[in-house]
Image: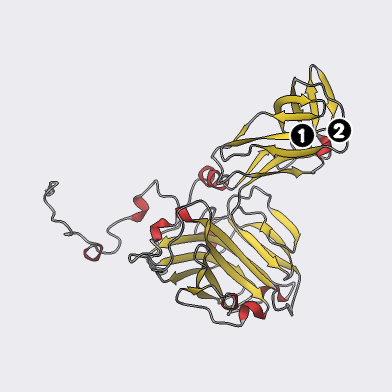
Amino acid sequence: MAFATIGTTGIADDAVTSAKVAPGVVDTEAQPNQSPIIINGDMAVAQRGTSATGKSSGGYYTCDRIKLNPDGLGTWTVTQESLTSGNAYANGFRKAFRIDCTTADASPSASDNLSVFQRLEGQDLQLFKKGTANAEKFTLAFWVKSNKTGTTQVNLRDNDNTRMVSATYSISSANTWEHKVLNFPADTTGAFDNDNANSLQIEWFLDSGTDYSSGTAPTAWEASSNADRNANNLDVGGSTDNDWAITGVQLEVGEFTSSTIPPFKHETFGDNLERCRRYYNIFGTNDTGTFAITGRIISSNRFDSQTIPFNPPMRAAPTLSLGGITDVNAFHFQYDGNGINSGSGSSFSAINAMTVGTRFRISASNTLTADEVANVQSAGSGDGIQHIVFDAEL
């Protein structure tokens, strides 16, 4: 078979346009360096653990980058669910983010609300060209399962310009994994900031009082309105029998259907974990081990650690906290061959936290020997701190 050769001057400007290329000719999956926009969309990474009980306030629980927000509405058990069967499993997904209602709120107050969301940095959204004449449409796809059937909604909330748009989806069969593909229009008003802050919040609304359910789900971009955020109420918090789970979340540029949407981009677990660590990182272990780090005793009651580097760098300078059994008094100092336990009244704080690394300080109430190089350890499972948490979540 003979092949034609195309020279560098052989094609006129604008001779090949998207309108002249048949669908599927250009394989968008053949871009190996293009990471998915959604981080941890397959719910595989759960640095905080696989189960959290008694949750009645907003927070990141179990699966990384997915936040539960039960603002006055119910109490929840949150799990990283392991899948062994079903449609989502058959399509390559082994984990899901799941919530189970353990304390119901069948008659929520007007301001009560329940949602699940992921926040995205503006600098990762510039390919949507939002706020320009060339603005692109959005397509969101995901697998969802619930014992509740009915119609509910997902909102795209532009935090930079206080705008929103919605799309609805229906859960048709109880306790069955269903794939949803939702289209959202382009927005020529209001560009996303090109920075590392929260520009877009993808919000799965699940229940609320009338402050959030008295309006209409907007199919065109509009000024944000709380009344429109849950116009189609699924009422997941209305009974302790209720649950809701999600996996396989992907956000694509352009308009797709269930038959044309690009395949979910499965990352290696290592690549997925590295992207999650930009927002949340652990030094030590979140199970039963200990950590140890070298530093210097600056004064009779102060220890400053060496720098703990972050790989990858974090989104912003993180806050520090103690994980495991959070008793700072369980720190153990060792220097010059001797070991001394820090006494009661000790404190723990960050020093010069940066995106690439940070140090920490322990102020001990017992007397230490100044100007000594020392090693500090946690006392381990059952006795003290098991890990240090670095948090730069949006």
> Secondary structure beneath disc 2?
loop
Is residue 292 placed above or below 185 in the rendered structure?
above
Instruction: Out of 151 and 232, give the one closest to the viewer.
Output: 232
- Quarter of the figure that contains the C terminus: bottom right
Residue at horizontal 75%, vertical 23%? Answer: 374
Tell me which residue sits at (83%, 36%) in the image.
Answer: 330
Q: Position of residue 164 (x, y in %)?
A: 51, 71
Look at 87% across and 29% down and name the residue there: 366
Q: Quadrant of residue 19?
A: bottom left
Q: What is the secondary structure assignment of the residue under circle 1?
A: strand
Question: Is 69 left, or right, of 278 in this rendering?
Answer: right
Res 283 → quadrant: top right
Q: What is the number of the mark on residue 362?
A: 1
The amino acid type, in three-letter code, at marker 2 is Ser
When the figure is inspected, residue 4 is found, relative to residue 135, above or below; the finding is above
247 up-or-down from 306: above or below: below
Q: Give the number of marks.
A: 2
243 and 113: which is toward the camera: 113
Residue 97 shown left or right of residue 160 in the figure: right
The dot on residue 296 is none
Residue at the spot x=48%, y=48% of the render?
267
Marks 1/2: CA distance? Answer: 10 Å
Q: Which residue is mark 2?
A: 365
Q: 10 Å neighbourhood of mark 2: few (<14), some, or many (≥20)?
A: some
Q: Position of residue 127 (x, y in %)?
A: 39, 57
Looking at the image, residue 367 sits to the left or right of residue 69; the answer is right
